Amino acid sequence: MFALVDGNNFYASCERVFDPSIRHKPVVVLSNNDGCAIARSAEAKALGIRMGHPIHLVEPAMRRQLVVRSANFTLYGDMSARVVSILRDASPRVEVYSIDESFLDMSGIRDREGFCRDLRERIHRWTGIPNCIGIAPTKTLAKLANKLAKSGQGVVTLASRQQQEIALQNFPVGDVWGVGKRWSEKLASLGIFSAAQLRDAPTDLILQRFGIVMTRTQRELQGQTCMDLEEVEPDRQQILVSRSFAERVEDHDAVAQAVATFAVRACEKLRRRGLVASAVGVFAHTDAFRPELKQHSPTRMISLPAATSDSRVVLGTVRRLMTGLLRPDYGYKKAGVTLTDLARPSELQGDLFSPAAVGDDRLMATLDQINRKFGRGVAGLGASGWKPKPAWGMRQQMLSPCYTTSVRDLPRATC
DNA sequence: TCTGGGGTCCTAGGACCC
DNA sequence: TCTGGGGTCCTAGGACCC
């Protein structure tokens, strides 16, 4: 039996924890560059603000009613860690599925509903994050139960066949975990509209039309566990750092500096996970939302002679990849760096004549330590350019303080 | 003026091997 | 004239997730 704990409107709720003045207002959190809505409070949803909707397309009159915030992932990540620590305290087996969702193993717990009600209350009281919990024999059903819990009850159990029957009859198939927009359209064309209909559809038809993944979903809806709790996060296969720029950038040096910055950041992520990369890629895009402008989306990838997590090695590679990549007189709107062929250094295949991995681990560890202690970007490499306001910077005009991770941003109480 | 970022898995098709 | 069977690896594209 699984429980899925999910923070309600997570990013919007994080914004509210330290700013009571926006508690009952329609709050919208925007994506990087203040582009699209990526979280909405209940009030904002009620006003019709859709997920992923570009904020500049919202009517000005409506826009004025909203409390709009730039995404503050430092804050959300820290709040998430607080919630997870409560979960780990409550249950020995936890899978952190995303920044705002975790699965818990419910086996051995007699009064599951009571347990989850307590847990829900504790999370809210200790962190300020409202949340809901769904309980069911499979992850897919637990996700479904969680969605039902959002409409008021807070905790929903779908343990018995009877409970599942009523719930699945009325549950739109497009809201089932693993069924996206495309699949739900295709399912509709086959006369499948509800979760119950998908559960009861002929398996060979589902396999033939949708593949193995959907049949797994179907089995999970039938109550058969296909997905276990993954307590240990599997190693990444790829690390990608990319950003859209606030403005189109024609200066190739500025793009190169942006890409260098992303490469350094990607290497930090790589080292943090204890991995090394054997391939490096770069890409850039012009502004796809301006079809009248000249478009160019170059991409390049190269295998390294030896695996590394050394920023200097990756930067040198990135510099070579960037040479001649961009076209003169084109304005670029986005760029990124990918690290692939990731591995643990101990698992690398050696070579008689050259080392399996290269780089100075101690130097990099020192660099990481300095930046952890004194703040990101305190020490680094010159290729990033080091400008306080680079041409490729992000737009973040409504950023909230990092209340929980920066001493300067500690909330103040006045009396 | 303004449109995110970071992942996963599966499948089909082509190149290549013996 | 005739032209197999079995496999791997890679890539691109498509679907999904938060």
Image (tube, coloured by chain):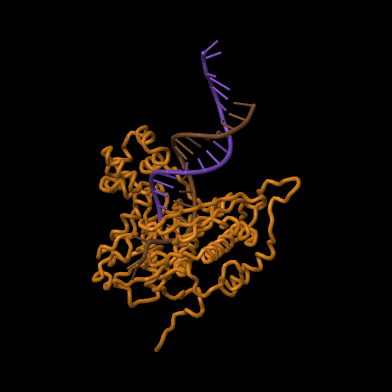
Chain colours: A orange, B brown, C purple
Q: Is residue A219 left or right of residue A362?
A: left
Instruction: Please tell me which residue lies in front, A96 or A105.
Output: A96
Image location (x, y in percent) of residue A210: 38, 38
Residue at (28, 59) in percent of width and height:
A151
Instruction: Please tell me which residue lies in front, A249 or A42.
Output: A249
Image location (x, y in percent) of residue C15: 38, 45
Q: Vertical placement of A52 versus A374: above or below?
A: above
Residue at (27, 67) in percent of width and height:
A43
Q: Is residue A313 left or right of residue A322?
A: right
Task: Name the residue furthest bottom.
Answer: A415
Image location (x, y in percent) of residue A81: 48, 65
In which quadrant of the rendered view does residue A387 lie?
Answer: bottom right
Instruction: Please tell me which residue lies in front, A154 or A383.
Output: A383
Placement of the C terminus of chain A among the 4 image quadrants: bottom left
In which quadrant of the rendered view does residue A216 lie?
Answer: top left
Question: What is the count of numbered marks?
Answer: 0
Residue at (30, 44) in percent of width and height:
A185
Q: Taking the image as drawn, is residue A113 in sight?
A: no
Instruction: Please tell me which residue lies in front, A294 or A239.
Output: A294
Q: Taking the image as drawn, is residue A133 in sight?
A: yes
Image location (x, y in percent) of residue A305: 66, 50
Q: Vertical placement of A256 versus A229: above or below?
A: below
Residue at (46, 65) in percent of width and height:
A249
Q: Vertical placement of A338 versus C15: above or below?
A: below
Task: Name the residue furthest front.
Answer: A329
